[in-house]
Structures are given as C-alpha cells and as structure tokens.
Image (cartoon, rainbow, N blue to C red):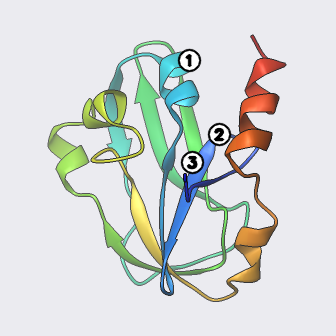
Amino acid sequence: MNDLKYTADHEWASLDQDIVTIGITDFAQDQLGELVYVELPETGIEVNVGQEVVVIESVKAAGDVKSPVKGTVVEVNSALNDDPEKVNADPTGEGWFYRVRVASPPDLDKLMDETAYQELIATLD
C-alpha cells in the first residue's frame, strides 16, 4: 500500500508520526528533466500550506516546490546541494527535499491518494 499523499502541483508527502517528508513526484521530475540546482529551506522556519519552500532548476525550466502542510522545517536533504540528480533517480526515495514537524495533521487528509493522483496525471498526458 502506498502511504504517499499528493498535491495537484505534483508534490508528495509522507507522514511518520508528526514528521512529514516532502518531495516531487516521478511525473514532475520527468516533466522537468534533469535537475541541475536545488535551493532548500533553512531548518527552523515555519511554512504554511501552499507556501513556496524549495526552488528547483532543471535543464528545461525553473520552478518551486510548495508545502502541502503547515509546520516547522526540521530537516533538509543537504545531499541534493551536491547531487540534485538524486531527485531524478529516486524522486520518492533519496530525492526528498525537506521534512516538516506538522502543525495540523488533518492537512494531509486534503491531499490526493495514489488513485486520485494517477487519475489526475492521466488527464495531463
């Protein structure tokens, strides 16, 4: 069973107790192409739902990763500073961006499950 939740902006979120790990989906990284730069947030900052938290640049485009939840950034994936291609190689594994101590776990209930997300991207092909 896939425990990931998804946004319409192609972010994923995974809850482990009160910590949510956030990244972009395989569909998103495929659309962007090879990532060449990732600007991660500072730990300790407060983020709100929909707030632009990460800046990403690829060979095709630049974009932002928005927070799907409200909370405090407690960890960033600093390995991406030297190796942003990890996002392309393993977007829902080693390619995660940051972790948030969630202020409101019900925020996750507003996100899509795997089935709903697959239906969304099927309309985009």
Tell me where residue 121 appears, x and y as whole percent. Answer: 74, 25
Q: Earlier in the sequence, mark 3 or mark 1?
A: 1
Q: Which residue is mark 1?
A: 31
Q: Determine the secondary structure under disc 1.
A: helix
Q: Residues within 10 Å of mark 2 (few under 14, many from 20)?
A: some
Q: Residues within 10 Å of mark 1 (few under 14, many from 20)?
A: few
Decide: is 36 above or below 40: above
Q: Residue at x 27, y 47 (%)?
A: 94
Instruction: Using the image as rendered, state which of residue 104 and residue 120 is in the foreground.
Output: 120
Q: How many marks?
A: 3
Q: Which mark is residue 65?
A: 3
Specify the amino acid type for callout 3: Val
Q: Earlier in the sequence, mark 2 or mark 3?
A: 2
Distance Cα–Cα, label 2 vs label 3: 9 Å
Q: Which mark is residue 120?
A: none
Location of residue 83 by image quarter: top left
Tell me where residue 45 appears, x and y as whole percent. Answer: 48, 80
Specify the amino acid type for callout 1: Gln
Specify the amino acid type for callout 2: His
Q: Is residue 26 left or right of residue 39?
A: right
Q: Which residue is mark 2?
A: 10
Discs 2, 1 touching: Cβ within 8 Å: yes
Q: Residues within 10 Å of mark 3 (few under 14, many from 20)?
A: many
Distance Cα–Cα, label 3 vs label 1: 14 Å
Q: Is residue 31 left or right of residue 120?
A: left
Q: Determine the secondary structure under disc 3.
A: strand
Discs 2, 3 touching: Cβ within 8 Å: no
Q: Determine the secondary structure under disc 2.
A: loop
Q: Earlier in the sequence, mark 2 or mark 1?
A: 2
Distance Cα–Cα, label 2 vs label 1: 10 Å
Decide: is 68 above or below 46: above
